[in-house]
Amino acid sequence: MRRSSTFARQVLLVRVGRRDGATVSGTDRVTPDHRYADRQRLRYGRLDTDIETVRPISPALAPAAPVDESPAMSIPLLPGERTAARRAKFALVNACTLSSLMLGMLAIFLAMRGDVQIAAICLIACVAFDGLDGALARKLGVASPFGAQMDSLADMCSFGLAAPVVVYASLAGSVPPAAAAVSCALVAGCAAVRLARFNVSPKDGRFFCGVPTTMAAAVLALTVAIGVPVSGLVMVAGVALLAFAMVSSFPYAKLARLLKLPPWLWLAPVVGALVDIRLTFALVVVGYLVSGPLLWRHQRRTA
């Protein structure tokens, strides 16, 4: 017992006190017994370390994290050369994005006044500007992460907020307000999820994962603009179905892939539009929505 207590005092560096309360000076510290030094080193695996150098480490003290004192680096909005010509091109592309945003705001104001068809036409113009800014950015060589984020925010305003507001205004008086509000709120929520998922997901050059927000807004705007002859409840159900299609995992063909179809396939929609544009539009929309589950089933079979 005496030997073990002596070793414990050596490890913890505890000064031994006298019975009368006086503290023993540093020179009176108990020295290790050299007869057991080799045995203790072999037992604790410390062949080349003196026992007196051991220090107790408190588990409450976490290791200090290194402090990054490097100056913050600003990321340029336009990567590459910052010439006057490239800045003008960059400003032109972002002007198209802002135009889409402002047209979306105008559509909201018009819908609040009851001019739903003019508001729907503004949404169609938003779709045109949304496609124009991306095409210009790639053609002029000024595509940037800033432009991608600007485009996503403008799409949320124009297609995720303005489109359901226009649809809600068009449904006023034909359906219960609660039903119209729920279906339009689904469009806004699913558009936000769709855009966020698109920003962080790997891109596929052939198919979209779910119906694109731009295409969903275009369908809603054209439905209001041409006045598709359906009842209010059918319209509410269609809006909710379109919202869920945006966040689905079904593959939908991109427009560039659709344009490569044989010309004779476009003959039927053209002839149908000349006969009855509303019915033809409804059939084309239903066919596109059904194509996603069919492609998904085909991919599962061939995988």
Image (cartoon, rainbow, N blue to C red):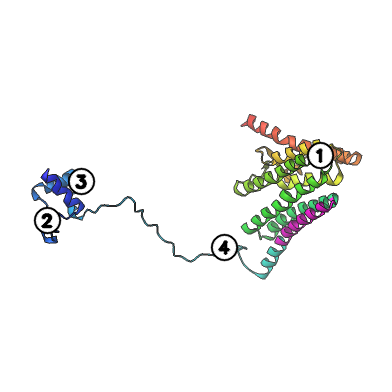
Which residue in the protein does label 2 denote?
A: 20
Q: Which residues are magenta?
A: 94-115
Whether residues under marks 4 and 3 lie with C-beta atoms below 8 angstroms apart, the answer is: no
Numbered tag placed on residue 45 in the rendering: 3
Q: Residue furthest top?
A: 301
Q: Earlier in the sequence, mark 4 or mark 2?
A: 2
Q: In the rendered structure, which amino acid carries the disc numbered 4?
A: Ile
Residue appearing at x 46%, y 65% in the figure: 70
Q: In the rendered structure, which amino acid carries the disc numbered 1?
A: Val
Q: Earlier in the sequence, mark 2 or mark 3?
A: 2
Whether residues under marks 1 and 4 lie with C-beta atoms below 8 angstroms apart, the answer is: no
Per the image, label 2 sits on a secondary structure element best described as loop
Q: Position of residue 212 (x, y in %)?
A: 70, 45
Residue appearing at x 90%, y 41% in the figure: 274
Q: Main secondary structure of the magenta part?
A: helix
Which residue in the protein does label 4 denote?
A: 75
Q: Earlier in the sequence, mark 4 or mark 3?
A: 3
Per the image, label 1 sits on a secondary structure element best described as loop
Classify 10 Å Cα crowding around label 1: few (below 14), some (14-19), many (20 and above): some
Q: Looking at the rendering, in which quadrant would you find the N terminus?
A: top left
Give the spatial CA distance, label 2 vs label 3. Answer: 38 Å
Would residue 107 be counted in the magenta stretch?
yes
Q: Earlier in the sequence, mark 3 or mark 1?
A: 3
Classify 10 Å Cα crowding around label 2: few (below 14), some (14-19), many (20 and above): few
Give the spatial CA distance, label 4 vs label 2. Answer: 71 Å
